[in-house]
Amino acid sequence: MTHQQHTRSLAHLDVLISGASVAGPALALNLARYGARVTVVERAPALRGGGFAVDFRGHVHRRVLTDMGIWEEIHARQTHMGPQSVVDAHGVPRVDLPAAMMSGDVEIFRGELARIMYERTRDRVEYVFGDSVTALAETPGGVEAAFEKGAPRRFDLVVGADGLHSTTRRLVFGDESRHLRFFDHYVAGFPVPNHLGLDRRGLMYSEPGRCVAVGNYDGDPDRAGALLVFRSKELTYDRRDVAAQKRLLAERFAGMGWETDRVLAALADTDDLYFDAIAQIHVDRLTKGRVALLGDAGYGATMGGMGTGVAVVGAYVLAGELALAGGDHRTAFAAYEDRIRDFAKGCQKISGNAGPFFAPPTERRIRSRDRMYRLLASRPVAGFFKRLTEKAATAIELPDYPAASGSPAV
């Protein structure tokens, strides 16, 4: 930025980031630009690929991604997703949803986005895969961190970027039950064969309380992705027992029309299943002592709340405030909290309707949804809808943070 303040180095800071999905690498990239010594620890044995497609929209997202030096590369790897259609049981379209309505200004797979940031930081950031934090103890001079496998280490600051079910949040801010709000629906995603011959298109079919959607995002003629959403009371299940999750989904979607049987056949064979509640995270504070929460760990929404955009903006703000404060975490954390809280809450509000959008509770509600989105998809209203969806994504004032010494290069 032309009016940015002089470069501020954070070379004296040792920062531990828990989580290497999107928020973690985003913060690592921003901190590395200021020279901080960063360690990212991730439970998974390697960087996760694939995942859902995520989108960015509006001038705030563009400014942040441009300052991070990754805007052009995101465009180079974008999905180029086309329209998505709501269909009836025979596959006949009931309403077409324009690409911009569902995919923003630019859309990319979550795994691709994480890899872009990882590739730009791996030579300047220490990544530790296959391990996780088990205890955190603050001392006058830092935070003592214990790990499941590695030796204990001391850091100046710790950031929990470890998702909706954050271990960091549980260790420092209390049990998940205090912070997670369940929104009466569950969602699953997994790859399926592209038996419908889709080419960067998506189809969605709803029956009362459940939905099956199939989409091809990358133009691969053989591959597609399935999304299942269903309405339910809160369930008790083991998040690591994939076989049990598959059985649960097969039971919930038994007898459903359209292409459901073929989707469930692919579910039985997959080794890449995402399954979780549609929920939000609400904490009283995003920071405590030398520990901060970022992204889904602090203000997550399972789907529909532009969570990836909020996480990347949050990472940019947190690093920028640390640079602005010369590494003084008390000043920086307070500013991060003040700047991000309302912005994140505004984006979360949008996500509250994600479950009922995909899986309306009655046939009447399904017809009502289709009528409403048919109107929103019409040309005179499309521009208004685009501005409406961008409103939450741009509802933050970003200061001119100190100029970084340089973007980490691949």
Image: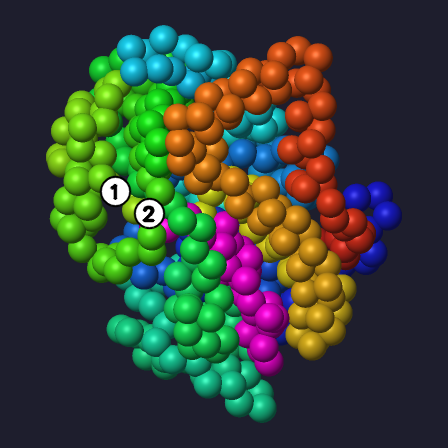
Q: Which residue is mark 2?
A: 232
Q: Nearer the viewer, residue 398 or 84?
A: 84
Say which residue appears at 45% left-offset and 50% top-offset.
183
Q: Is residue 38 above or below residue 244?
A: below
User: Seen in the image, is 202 located left or right of residue 28?
Assistant: left
- Name the residue type under label 2: Ser
Residue 89 at least partly seen: yes
Q: To which quarter of the image does residue 207 belong?
A: top left
Please tell me whether residue 277 belongs to the stretch shown in magenta. yes
Q: Position of residue 372 (x, y in %)?
A: 57, 22
Question: What whole-number distance in Å separates the C-alpha atoms at marks 1 and 2?
Answer: 19 Å
Q: Mark 1 vs mark 2: which is more N-terminal?
A: 2
Callout 1 crowding tier (Cα within 10 Å): few <14, some 14–19, many ≥20: some
Q: In this orientation, which residue lies closer to the viewer: 283 or 255?
A: 255
Residue 198: x %, y % from top left: 34, 13
The dot on residue 273 is 1
Please rate how many residues cluster around mark 2, counting C-alpha atoms within 10 Å: few if below 14, some from 14 to 19, many from 20.
some
Question: Which segment did they paint magenta?
Answer: 276-301
Residue 224 is situated, as x and y percent measured from the top left of the image, at 30, 24
